[in-house]
Image: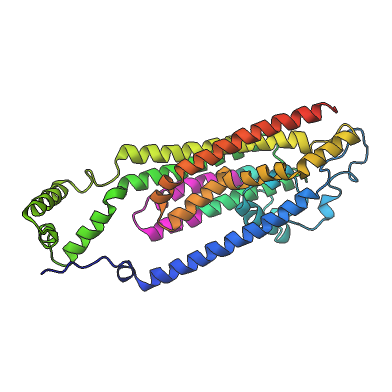
Amino acid sequence: MLKIKSFNLKRRLPTCYLLSSKVLLSLAVILSVYFIVMDIKLFHHAKTRGPYSGIKSSKNLSKFGLGDIKNKKYSLFWPLPVKKIMMAEATHFIRSPIAEFVEHGLGFSNLFPFISANFISVTHCILSVVTIKFLMHDSLFWRQIGVAIFQFRNFLDSFDGVIFRVHANKTAYTSHYGSLGYYVDAFSDVFGGICLVGSIALYLLKNRPPKKSLTRCFWLADDLVESGSTIEKSALTRSTSSDDLFNNLAVNSNLRNKSPKEGIHATKITILTSVALLGIRIAVSAFFWDKSVRAYQDLLDSPAVSELHQKLQVKILSSTFTLLIMILWRIMNALSLQDMILTAIFLDKTWEFVVKSQLVGWIVLISLIILTELHIAEVRSILLQVI
């Protein structure tokens, strides 16, 4: 009786790939633990932060708020405005410290005073276009290179904010809504997201993933071809009656007669719809994150009109419920979602992430948006009573 060679994943994969997978898994675990520990410290510092700005009528705001920031050493937790509490972990704990070191430690602006924040924004727009060619490549190695380039693009997105504050002689860590730099930065972020999602769509259309229900059939057929067996021989070895033999031959004949991408791979409509929903989720997340940051800044980081108003600002910000909403936005904002996507691309799990994250991602995001809008409305009504 003919023996069919079984599928052995470890036998198929090179040893170096298995070792690199373990290294990547270890790095992922280390980064996750690092982010969790730092978020716990952030939570503690935010609860004891105190007022971020002073009272409007006060002439000396330093005793209420930031004090002399220029004479302070850089700290991850000081100053701690709303925007920093709500930003992505990778930006807060990795990209921003590196950007601050390049500027204040290496003196970037002194060496290159002609490089502006807008110039850096245009540069990472160009890098976004460059990564399309890499991220849609058939080779995993070149896609991983594309991930590295896009991560450098994300670093520049943090670095242009540092350069803007230095050139504008501004110390407050806040979004400068309405300025030219704000719109340039917003456009470059949107453009980068479009390039990332577009490259995913192009890659998946070129390398259409198999349907989940037929993935096992593909692996089995591949093993049969490798062992010199045919699908009909497989049916013979598995059949115990003439009826079973007839049914197996009919099913296998249908599979064999179909084109490689007909009925077996995900359709183009499925791929485009799934990727489009991912892009919409990034856009919705970015819009409501920015909207929430602006609202919380106006309510909790703006100068108070009285001591009672200031005490309420501090009390609301330090409440566990407020901080939980803000920390959830750290996980659900667009940059964090982009980091998850880039990790999936690096691990060659792009389609798995696109499909499996859809339902949970939308449920959590919509729930967080509704919760945030209700909370902001409640905070606004409370503060209006003392103004």
User: Residue 287 location in percent, x, y?
Assistant: 58, 35
Q: How is the image coloured?
A: rainbow
Above or below, comparing residue 195 to residue 100 in the picture: above
Q: Is 321 inside the magenta-drawn segment? A: no
Quarter of the image holding residue 228? bottom left
User: Residue 326 location in percent, x, y?
Assistant: 67, 43
Q: Residue at x 10, y 60 (%)?
A: 236
Please indicate whether residue 212 sits to the left or right of residue 77 in the image: left
Residue 111 seen from this side:
no
Q: In terms of depth relative to the viewer, which is nearer, 151 or 104?
A: 151
Q: Residue furthest right?
A: 59
Q: Residue at x 71, y 41 (%)?
A: 322
| Magenta part, dominant SS | helix
User: Residue 44 location in percent, x, y?
Assistant: 75, 53
Please indicate whether residue 255 sits to the left or right of residue 75 in the image: left
Q: Is 147 inside the magenta-drawn segment? A: yes
Please indicate whether residue 222 sits to the left or right of residue 266 in the image: left
Q: Residue furthest bottom?
A: 15
Image quarter in which the C terminus is found: top right
Q: Residue at x 93, y 37 (%)?
A: 59
Which range is magenta?
120-149
User: Residue 90 location in percent, x, y?
Assistant: 60, 54
Image quarter in which the N terminus is found: bottom left
Residue 353 seen from this side:
yes
Q: Residue furthest front?
A: 241
Q: In terms of depth relative to the viewer, which is nearer, 317 or 296?
A: 317
Above or below, comparing residue 328 to residue 306 in the picture: below
Count of numbered tags: 0
